[in-house]
Image (spheres, helix red, strand yellow):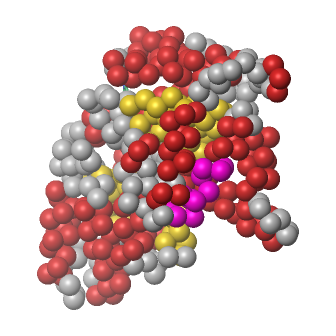
Amino acid sequence: MTDFVRLYEDMVAAGDLRPDPAQRAVLPEFERIRAGLAQPRRRGLFRRAPEPPQGLYLWGGVGRGKSMLMDLFVDSIGGEVPVRRVHFHAFMQEIHAAMHAARERGVADPLAPVAADVAASVRLLAFDEMQITDITDAMIVGRLFEALFAARVVVVTTSNRVPDALYENGLNRQLFLPFIALIKDRMEVRELASPTDYRQDRLEGEPVYFTPLGPEARRAIGAIWADLTGGPAQPLILQVKGRRVELPEFRNGIARAGFFDLCGRMLGPADYLAIAGAVKVLVLEDIPRLSRNNFNEAKRFVTLIDALYEARVRLICSAADVPEMLYVEGDGAFEFERTASRLREMQSADWGQA
Ligand SMILES: Nc1ncnc2c1ncn2[C@@H]1O[C@H](COP(=O)(O)OP(=O)(O)OP(=O)(O)O)[C@@H](O)[C@H]1O
Ligand SMILES: [Mg+2]
């Protein structure tokens, strides 16, 4: 295992990272966890009180480097203790699926055995993008984390929200409050208060709209994708009103999909809102020329762009033509002018989440 502060400084010295005082300020928290993980798990009688915090809750604005630091940390631990890095949303879906399976086997209270299985398989859980929007998640996370902490699992998580703002205005929120108390009690809560949005910086001045379609556009988009994600992607499944909406590739808040993945299926406004709420950057490839022959696809595309626009999601795309020429004839061509204008605006250097 490598000293985490040194690892960061080595990367700064090598020119891989820009030195950032706010990032530097949270490095000791990671280092403390690393040092703790190097110790064997203390159990039972010989456990000394008081318990040290068992994790780190790193929150802050978009693009500040939370996921980057967490990934660097997970990689630096790699192989020495069982670690799992997972998008929080994907993890919760697994938990629900495992609980469902246990119930089918006749287990009356499946949360405890499911949590025990997780705890048996990992020592460190690294969650990217903790956010709670779903009541089914809100009602079990308290007991779930209680069980994980009791089994001495260490949790590192990134979030855009301070713990007190989790599940804000959620249904039955009072039942959720013990979870917030648990986080504050068992995890070090730190803000990554950097003034720099590095994701925005990376995209600033870069073209984000590629036309015409072809190998050149594909290569350019592939390069941006690799630069922004910096690691292997996984599908992200969103549940919207009982439907499954799949983003085929997702990592670090960035999703990549083909036009027909999102606009060639029977998706509606609620689905596009869910997508816009789940991603910070959408890479959308192969937008074709639209006409009355693919009117439904065009209509869905308009709805998708509206949702992305409202949520100030960054869009990186490849298209058969410039925005104004994508849909020039057929019903709704007039309405498409707004979409074209939005597509233009979304290409500007300062477009994106504040
Ligand atoms: N100090 C730095 N020097 C250079 N690049 C950086 C630095 N910190 C972060 N980055 C890069 O900036 C981009 C955004 O960082 P990251 O994904 O970690 O942000 P985040 O805080 O997790 O944002 P979000 O809340 O939106 O998930 C990444 O490509 C990351 O590698
Ligand atoms: Mg992140």
Q: Residue at x 44, y 42 (%)?
A: 163
Task: Please give the name of the residue rendered at 26% of the width and 55% of the height, measured from the top-left corner.
Answer: 312
Between residue 139 and residue 309, name the one nearer to us: 139
Q: Is residue 190 visible?
A: yes
Report the magenta residues as a range: 134-144
Front residue (pair 45, 297) = 45
Total marks drawn?
0
Residue 40 falls inside the magenta stretch: no
Place residue 210 in its image quadrant: bottom left
In the shown orientation, is residue 354 left or right of residue 85?
left
In the rendered image, which quarter contains the N terminus? top right
Q: Residue at x 73, y 67 (%)?
A: 100
The residue at the point 43 percent across, 62 percent down is: 170
Q: Up-down: is 297 above or below 202?
A: below
- On screen, residue 287 versus residue 258, left or right, reads left
90 relative to 159 in the view: left or right: right
The quadrant in which the C terminus is found is top left
Q: Where residue 126 sits in the image (x, y, percent)?
A: 59, 38
Report x, y in % for residue 97: 70, 63
Q: Secondary structure of the magenta portion, mostly?
A: helix
Camera-side residue: 51 or 301? 51
Q: Is residue 226 visible?
A: no
Could you tell me residue 201's position as x and y percent?
27, 34
Q: Residue furthest right?
A: 105
Percent across and percent down for residue 110 are 77, 60
